[in-house]
Amino acid sequence: MPDLMVEIKSKSDRIKPLVEKIQLFLQLGSTVGILIDPDKLTLTVYRLNQEPIVLQDNDKLTLPDLLPGWELVVSEIWTPVFE
């Protein structure tokens, strides 16, 4: 099992099956599952037996147990909007 798994919701995906897939990976040994939802501009971090953490806007994703010193500002993954 990978330590980290990421699912990106497409327009046609439903959230529940994606969350169930992430939970399955966690039960099988993954440390962290991330669900990226471009429709809601959110990134949700899942860990086994913990409440999911929803990040958005200028929140920072950090995974010190897997990627020490690495961080990502959530808003940086969305397509820029030019006015």
Image (tube, helix red, strand yellow):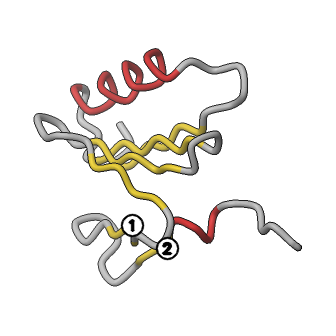
Q: Is residue 6 left or right of residue 68?
A: right
Comparing 20 with 57, the one in front is 57
Place residue 37 in its image quadrant. Answer: top right
Q: Residue at x 40, y 69 (%)?
A: 59
Count the marks: how many? 2
Percent position of residue 5, x then y: 44, 43
Percent position of residue 56, x then y: 46, 59
Query: Going by the picture, which residue comes out furthest to the bottom?
Result: 69
Percent position of residue 68, x then y: 30, 78
How far apart marks 2 and 1 lie (CA) works out to: 6 Å
Comparing 78 with 47, the one in front is 78
How packed mark 1 is, by other alpha carbons closer than 10 Å (few <14, some 14-19, many 20 or more), is some
Q: Residue at x 17, y 40 (%)?
A: 51
Q: Residue at x 88, y 73 (%)?
A: 83
- Could you tell me which secondary element the residue under label 2 belongs to? strand
Q: Image height check: is 44 above or below 49?
A: below
Comparing 66 with 43, the one in front is 43
Q: Which residue is mark 1?
A: 61
Query: Going by the picture, which residue comes out furthest to the right?
Result: 83
Q: Image height check: is 53 above or below 57?
A: above
Place residue 1 in its image quadrant. Answer: top left
How packed mark 2 is, by other alpha carbons closer than 10 Å (few <14, some 14-19, many 20 or more), is some
Which amino acid, mark 2?
Val
Q: Which residue is mark 2?
A: 73
Percent position of residue 62, x then y: 34, 70
Proximity of marks 2 and 1: CB atoms separated by less than 8 Å: yes
Query: Going by the picture, which residue comes out furthest to the left?
Result: 49
- Could you tell me which secondary element the residue under label 1 belongs to? strand
Q: Is residue 22 left or right of residue 13?
A: left
Which amino acid, mark 1?
Leu
First in residue order: circle 2 vs circle 1: 1
